[in-house]
Amino acid sequence: MAVGAPLLCIAGQDSELASLVARYRIGRCFGADQLADMRCFVLEMVDHPEQLQELRSNSLNASLDFGVENAKRFIY
């Protein structure tokens, strides 16, 4: 997230990763057997650079919630 990259995840829709991706609107999660859907997602990003840029911005913004200072709040 800190590099501003959208996420294409292979994870169950009921996983914590899928929840994080949906909450921050930073990409999409797919099942391992959803290759055609993954391909469509990649092509959608190529065809719609404004959507790609939105996911990039969302990813950078989300990374602010996962820095060292935030982690320390949970450790100490």
Image (tube, rainbow, N blue to C red):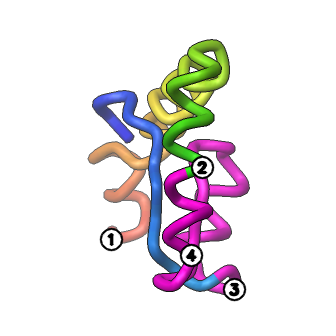
Magenta residues (range): 13-39
In primary-sequence order, the first of circles 2 and 1 is 2
| Foreground residue among 42 and 25 | 42
Question: CA gap, disc 1 to disc 3?
Answer: 26 Å
Helix, strand or loop under label 2: helix
The residue under label 2 is 40
Helix, strand or loop under label 4: loop
The residue under label 4 is 34
Helix, strand or loop under label 1: helix
Query: In the image, is residue 71 above or below residue 34?
Result: above
> At 56% across and 65% down in the image, what residue appears?
36
Residue 27, position as x, y percentages in the image: 57, 47
Q: Are marks 1 and 4 in contact (CB under 8 Å)?
A: no
Question: CA gap, disc 2 to disc 3?
Answer: 22 Å
Question: Which residue type carries mark 4?
Answer: Gln
Residue 21, position as x, y percentages in the image: 60, 56
The residue under label 1 is 75
The quadrant where residue 67 appears = top left
> At 32% across and 35% down in the image, what residue appears?
2
